[in-house]
Amino acid sequence: MSEVFVIRNQHGHYWGKAKAWVDGAEPRTVMRTGHRDEATNTLVELSAKDIELRGEIMAVVLGDKGEPMVEASDIPVPLTPEQIAAEEATRHAVEQAEAESPDTDSPASEITDTAEDSHEVTDSGA
């Protein structure tokens, strides 16, 4: 088993390969490097962008599958601005579709249904 370095923040999240924080539940998504100085450089860059960040570099071993053996965080990872925008767009589209769809429970549809039923009775009785 070999040792690698990962970056963990104050919430127990790990810096991921996709350049976003991950909770560590899927270790293959955690960014790892074989050199501490590379992890240090990445942490400095992250800290420059986020002054609230309290990160640490951790040495961890790789498991049998070559994935870092990290403990998953119980704290959910916050959504990125892109994810928030996507959720809002989806919510807006659903609301718009609901507003445009005919309401089958409205009294007008019941009147139409009743008129059609009485028309059928009239036709069959004639």
Image (cartoon, rainbow, N blue to C red):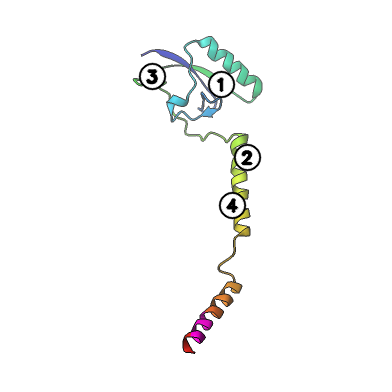
Residue closer to the observer: 62 or 89 = 89
Give the mark nearer the N terminus: 3 vs 2: 3
Residue closer to the observer: 17 or 58 = 17
Give the mark nearer the N terminus: 4 vs 3: 3
Q: CA distance from mark 1 to mark 3?
A: 24 Å
State the image quarter where residue 71 is shown: top left
Q: Residue drawn 59% across and 52% down?
A: 94
Q: CA distance from mark 2 to mark 4?
A: 14 Å
Give the amino acid at mark 3: Gly
Q: Which residue is mark 2?
A: 85
Q: Position of residue 115 (x, y in %)?
A: 56, 80
Give the amino acid at mark 4: Val
Circle 3 Cα neighbour tier, 10 Å, few/some/many (<14 / 14–19 / ≥20): few
Q: Which residue is mark 1?
A: 55
Q: Residue drawn 62% across and 18% down?
A: 45
Q: Which residue is mark 3?
A: 66
Give the amino acid at mark 2: Ala
Give the magenta part as a residue range: 117-123
